[in-house]
Image: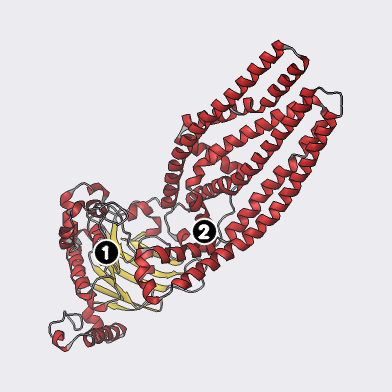
Amino acid sequence: MSHEPEPLPSSLSSLWLSLKLGYRTEPLLMLAGFLTTVAAAVPDALLALGLALLVDAVATGDRTAIYGSAVLLAALGIASWLMDVVSARVNMRLTERAAVGIEAHMVSLHASVPTIEHHERLPYVDRLSVLRDHASALGALYQMLFGAIGVILRMAIAVGLLLSIRPELALLCLCAVPPVLVSNWRAGAEKRAEEAGAQSRRRALSMFQLGTTPDTAKEVRVAGVQERIIDISAASWEYRYRPLARARTASGAWLAAAYAVFAVALVASVGLIADGPDTVGSVLLVLVAGSRLSQYLGQTVRDTHLFREIWLDCARRLTWLENFSVSAASGATDDAPGRLDGGIRLENVTFQYPGTDSDVLTDVSLDLPAGSVVAIVGENGAGKSTLVKLLCKYYEPTSGRITVDGMDLAHIAPSAWRARITGAFQDFVKFEYPIREAVGIGDLGRLDDPAAVDAAIRRAGATDLVERLPDGVHTQLGTTWEDGADLSHGQWQKIALARSFMLQDPLLVILDEPTSALDAQAEFDIFERYAEVAREGAAHGRMTVLVSHRFSTVQMADLIVVLDGSRVAEYGSHRDLMARDGLYAELYRIQASAYHSALPDAARSGAPATGSEV
């Protein structure tokens, strides 16, 4: 992935792809929306002609012409109103249905990108944040497009009516061009100013979340930072809006000037016709058609601005995301092995996050045997989580390679590899589902298997938690739902752990500090359960990788890898590393000493074995 995203695609290609997406979603509604919106333009634009004919008939006293013109005018009015109502209803339904289809398509595109780099790179985040902000409104693209076509048809009819009176009135039509051109330029200028302030907008929204969500309420009040959050939010919005306001002021001034030119031309045209030999109906036609042209022009300017600023811009971003997902798709097609016989090997693996010059991992070479329990330990920033990301194929190594039973991991299809991976992470997701579903999605094939879900809950040590809830495994999680249960962070973490126990016969189990919210004894017990399950699957080569900052809870691991400053400092079993008396032994003793010194004297004798060798 390059440091900067590719330029946005052209407007025409993006519009065409969006139209195809909408047609695939709702073909009949899309066709009906187009026909009714365009059909509504004709009787509306011809009202000026009906008025002119009625005035001429009244002036001449021709009763037949008066009645005929009145009927025509009434028919045009009724047809215009009826088609507008039908068009509005059809387009509203199309917008709703298209929005659902577009949002689902966006989720699919995001999910099809095999890595997570685009979620962590600022240029990509800036581009995607604007698309996410307006994603739900993108469904109105088709209504706006059809409306724009209808307005153009109205303007064409109005221009035709004016030219039927005098050819010189073509000058009035030419004066209608500058407002449209200025409006088109204005939308682009304001969108560039809005994107430049995307980071400030995210900062302001982040401050809003800090100040209004229950997860942060306690710490915000204890720290007394309410006023600071308000100040940062206000400054961020101000920083965002200042250049946007300047762009809007400048573009608004140019638009006002363009309108002034058209207004002068319209007044001159009415004066020209009124001073000539034309009939009263002709004068009225110029006046009404000219004013309607002005009205259509204003609608065109407004719709063009919104169309360019929001809908067409979002369509270009959506097309970019579609192209990006295709280009980012992995060319790897090999299937994952059915079992591990040899294990996973890292050969001189070095990794730098894109856009940075420092190594997070440097020349790492490791043999991780099949059927083993591997613990990765080290201080913060040593590269533990980065190593996990590489094993999960969230990133590719900058240099070196990772092999699975001799197969290059880069050649294994990401979907095939991840189908054989399970685990739990420190930044786990709080799925606000009923508990049975929140756990069961760890293996979609067994989502409806109560025995499998219950076994996973039991292995995670969450049985007591579930039994205390009002509806057991059927309890709805999350306070945003009616009768939803509010869990502590540690309880949510147990649900995530249970989810990781669902997958049958995984090749690799990843546990990246999944018990950070639990005490040391609880973490030790859970890791023991994982080790027990891992050894049950050792015959199939199942490997379990534990990441923890607590050295004392990973003693049961077959292999402990100690990272220090992006490199592997040492590795071996707990006994071997303690005997070597190196970095692991030093950090182990520091943690053990700190743990025991924090206990009351009466409690030390009964403390869990986290401060001495086991």
Q: Residue at x 21, y 86 (%)?
A: 596
Amino acid on which disc 1 is placed: Gln
The reply to whether residue 10 is visible in this rendering is: no
Residue sitting at x 50%, y 62%? 202
Residue at x 71% of width, y 19% of height: 54
Q: Nearer the viewer, residue 538 or 614?
A: 614
SS state under label 2: helix
In-front residue for pair 449/222: 222
Q: Give residue 493's mark.
A: 1
Q: Residue at x 17, y 80 (%)?
A: 609
The amino acid marked with disc number 2 is: Tyr
Badge 1, how many Cα within 10 Å: few under 14, some, many 20+?
A: many
Secondary-structure class at tag 1 = helix
Residue 124, numbered label: 2
Q: Position of residue 416 (x, y in %)?
A: 34, 52
Estimate the spatial distance between the alpha carbons at disc 2 and disc 1, rounded to whole Å: 30 Å
